[in-house]
Amino acid sequence: MSRVFKTPSLFYLVVALVILLLIVSCSKKLPEVELKPAPDSPPEWASDVIWYQIFVERFHNGDKSNDPKIENIKGTYPGYIPENWSLTPWTQDWYKEDEYFKQVHGKLDFLNNPINSFDAKTSLRRYGGDIQGVIDKLDYLTELGVNAIYFNPINDAPSAHKYDARHWRHIDVNFGPDPVGDIELIADEDPADPSTWVLTSADKLFLEFLQMAKSKGIRVILDYSWNHTGHTHWAWRDLLENQQESEFADWYWVKQFDDLTTAENEFEYRGWFGVFDLPEIQETVYEDHSKQVRLFEGNIKSDSAKSHILAVTRRWLDPNGDGDPSDGVDGYRLDVAAELPLGFWREYRTYVKSINPEAFLVGEIWWEKWPDDLFDPAPVLKGDIFDSVMNYRWYRAARQYFSKSSITMLPSELEESLSAQRLNIADSFYESMMNMSASHDSPRLLTSFNNKNKYKYNAKESQNARYNANKPSQETMQRAKLLLAHQFTYIGSPQIWAGDEMGMWGSDDPHNRKPLIWSELEFENETSHPKALIKSEDSVRFNHDLFEYYQFLIDMRKSNPVLRQGQVEFTDVNDARKIFGYKRAFKAGDASENDNQMAWVVFNSSRYEHTLLSPQSLLKTNTWQVWHNNAGLKMLITAPSEQLLLPANSVTIVIAE
């Protein structure tokens, strides 16, 4: 009887263990998403938005109780944090050295290089911006008129920029109300098992913000870099500890594991562009991007790494997992997208669109070969990969024309450049382009216009002592306003780098990431960078005139569908008179109540007043005209006129029903 009892008990015990292992194994996989054919065009809403890009850490400090402490930033560049480290006052002169800078000077960074430069030391700065700060300023964004937010990464990470993810699946602990409690919650999870993931206080606050934004008609997308993690990421730390025995050993590009039988550490790996603290996710093929970036086929090698990426993606698209994405984000901005294989992106699009067909995917497709060759994004805008890219090509051409760049451009050359950019790209995709004027990775708009250098080349004081990082002149402001008029009347969705509308200035990273100059705050005057030869002392104040100009352009674009979706035809391009113009109109037969609306935009970049014959199509009764030159902005309701006056250095916009 005992034998009969023991045999089936052992059998059932083994069966139970097998079932338990299967349950545990399956629990690490998210419930299946029913994959459906993805739409082969962008969502319709993408051409109607005005993007506002937010770098949360420098946006607004709404909750001082969650400000970062030393333990929160361990692992950030440069790798050394002095004991007297402290938060930098929001209104402090940007160029003023923090007290702890003295203790940092001369210490060694991750790569054993001395930390001597001002730029390197500012990597340690934190100002305390958080999600509550964005919530507090939602009414400001509504007043400005933007209707879409693109967040720089808000995933948990030790750096200010957050591209060095510690945890992809959570909002940064210092962006929420309870950093200590959130760290404890995260520690109790199995990061590789989505079934154990909980919502931290930071996660919950972000979801509350998301609903507030949606209630105001504001869409939200998040920035992720699936190309790499930070070196404090949980999978990377497990790999470092367990080497080839780690279950995450195939996640990363490891050249050589450590031989534990020797005293030396033979461990070698690939970091993004050689950056020590950004270990790269491994693909099925290796593509060397050091000299030139090329689009390439392939996929992410590790199925578990890819599954984790998809689980994080789904987490924010459908936070409560009920199959209704209305409570989730509206899409993703995908960092260094050209450095991940196209096969992965095709799978990613199918997965994302199966959860939310209206989700928006915008890739950072930027430099093919630094510093001259920008990518032609046409191959990734065919309906199987992205809905849009960050359109730096548009900005580089427009900057050359409207600013006093070292590379001058004639009106006919601008027309040629803008026309060439649209080759092999369908209208629906070009209308959804994110037309960048500045970002966290380039000089601010006003500073870019204040210098004659090649686009983004030697674009900060530490690279070019003669680079002008001072407060831009009034002339610079007027020229930038002409570019803005072009941005808000041309095809593609305008983007604003938060603070540009306030009149902020700053050269390339890190000086483009100053804390925002809110009107209710009193800032110290700014003195020149220690490396700069151009010296000055500048008052730092919110520019209400520029803010109102942005408001006007945003309202004009939102109020006139032809400025968002009308076809573009270049009509008045005259090199001798320095006139550049285009008409926007709907195609004949477009099913729209506004299909008779037309717009005519003409820039006079010369020092002289000119006149033009008005197109017959604009000689209608309901016409309004706006023009802007050095004298300011004027809006006129006009009667039909056969001749149009073009003031010197101006833009004239005529809209007719």
Image (cartoon, rainbow, N blue to C red):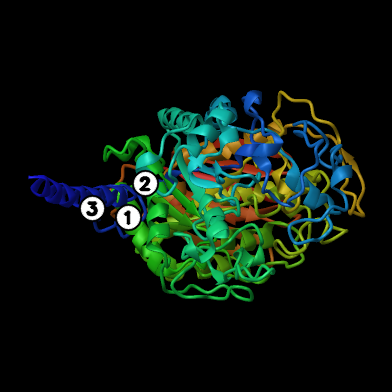
Vertical comparison of 146 with 137: above or below: below
Q: Secondary structure at mark 2?
A: helix
Q: Position of residue 353 (x, y in %)?
A: 32, 52
Residue found 71% across the figure and 27% down from its top: 519
Which residue position holds label 1? 351
Query: Which label number is shown at residue 200?
Result: none
Residue at mark 2: 314
- Residue at label 3? 18
User: Residue at the spot x=62%, y=68% of the render?
Assistant: 267
Give the number of the mark in front: 2 or 3. 3
Q: Are marks 2 and 1 in contact (CB under 8 Å)?
A: yes
In the figure, residue 54 lies in which quadrant?
A: top right
The amino acid type of the residue labelled 3 equals Val
Q: Amino acid under label 2? A: Arg
Residue 351 in view of the camera: yes
**Residue 368 position within the rendered picture, expressed as x and y whole percent measured from the top left:** 58, 71
**N-terminal label among 3 and 1:** 3
Please tell me which residue is depicted at 33% across the width and 36% down the height of the picture.
326
The front one of 179 and 222 is 179
Q: Position of residue 589 (x, y in %)?
A: 28, 54
Element at badge 1? helix
Position of the C terminus by quadrant: top left
Q: Left or right: 273 with respect to 432? A: right
Which residue type carries mark 1?
Answer: Tyr
- Left or right relative to 358: residue 220: right
Marks 3/1: CA–CA distance: 31 Å
Comparing 210 with 452, the one in front is 210
Report the Cα–Cα distance between label 2 and label 3. 29 Å
Q: Callout 2: few (<14), some (14-19), or many (20+) C-alpha neighbours within 10 Å?
A: many
Q: Position of residue 149 (x, y in %)?
A: 51, 40
**Sequence-first disc among 2 and 3:** 3
Q: How many marks?
A: 3
